[in-house]
Amino acid sequence: MTQGQDWVGLGIAGNQAEHLAQAGEADDFKEVVALENAPKGMFPWYIPGSDSFLGVHPLSHDRLNNNSEGFLQPEPEIALVVKFEYSDRDEKLLDDISVLGFSAFNDCSRRVAAAKISQKKNWGAASQGMAKEILSIDDFTREGGTSDNYRLTCYLKRDGELLQYGKDTAVTDYCYSNQTLVDWMVNQINTQQDNGPLEPIGQMLVTSKPAYGIIAIGATCYSEFGNSEMRFLKEDDEILVIAYDGDQHTTSALEKSLIGSPLPESNASRLILQQQVTTISPPPNTSPQEA
């Protein structure tokens, strides 16, 4: 979809009203000014060519690197594959963003104290996840378009038990979506400054100007288990993030299909990310603390 060209990985914080509080990050944004019910800001999780930890490609379709800290928590999200339309004018970087497709995404986070959101996101190879299949769309900006029919859910398989980890959530429950979200992202990339947990996204992209991006549009809220003392990932856990068409699948039928083995394959109405938690020795000089 990106035709072999460079792409950047970005995320959106605070596009679900309760998530920041559940993640223990609400206080981090107390100095960030945002409109009521609007997302709080954007953050990078992959910048190709960066000499910091952000330059390490973190995406995997089938595994999640347990960094042995014991404080990893999956974040189920919808990820958009986008094309950036750069401006010819000096006063702004972007004119527009075109949404080409979407998929199921795990914006996994280290629940540790860090000055910037990005320092919680990329600890090396296989520290983030995205389903291999991407559904092409050309109607994201239209209310009632393809993505508005979808729901997002997340499960954890642990010791043979299927546990609901993230609440089953409609894509339309995001605070910002459709054209409103696209307009907000363009403005945020053009104007976001170094402020609290946020970084100046536009300045980080102005030199390389990657043609494409994968933008995770915000984590949904956690279930009771996802908020419990047992929430942190362990070796051999299996993470399942599913984006599915609510008109074609029911929650109960979906859960039954996840209990057995092998899992059902992804298709146009059901995009499945399946990651096995493993331990990978990190490459040198990729720790967020060294950035």
Image (tube, rainbow, N blue to C red):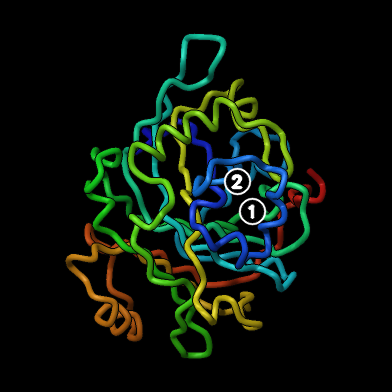
Looking at the picture, which amino acid does disc 1 mark? Lys
Circle 1 is placed at which residue position? Answer: 121
Residue 214: x and y in percent read 46, 43
* Position in image of residue 165 (x %, y %): 49, 76
Which residue position is annotated with label 2?
Answer: 45
> How many residues crowd mark 1 within 10 Å: few (<14), some (14–19), many (20+)?
many
Residue 84 drawn at (x, y percent): 43, 28
* Image quadrant containing the N terminus: top left
Q: Amino acid at mark 2?
A: Trp
Location of residue 183 (image quadrant) = top left
- Seen as rendered, the residue at the extreme bottom is 160
Residue 8 image point, x, y percent: 53, 37
Which quadrant of the figure has residue 264? bottom left
- Residue at the (32%, 63%) spot, across then down: 151
The answer to which of 181 and 279 lies nearer the viewer is: 181
Between 44 and 42, the one nearer to me in the picture: 42
Calculate the distance from the C-alpha at mark 1 to the C-alpha at mark 2.
Answer: 6 Å
Q: Residue furthest top?
A: 89
Residue at 72 percent of width and 52 percent of height: 28
Determine whether, in the image, residue 104 is placed left or right of residue 135: right
Q: Are marks 1 and 2 in contact (CB under 8 Å)?
A: yes
- Side (left or right) of 165 relative to 114: left
Which numbered disc, 1 or 2, marks the residue that appears first in the sequence? 2
Q: Is residue 50 or residue 15 the one in the foreground?
A: 15
Q: Report the residue that reaches farthest toward the right.
A: 290
Q: Is residue 210 above or below residue 176?
A: above
Q: Please state, as top left, top right, bottom left or bottom right, where the C terminus lies in the image.
A: top right
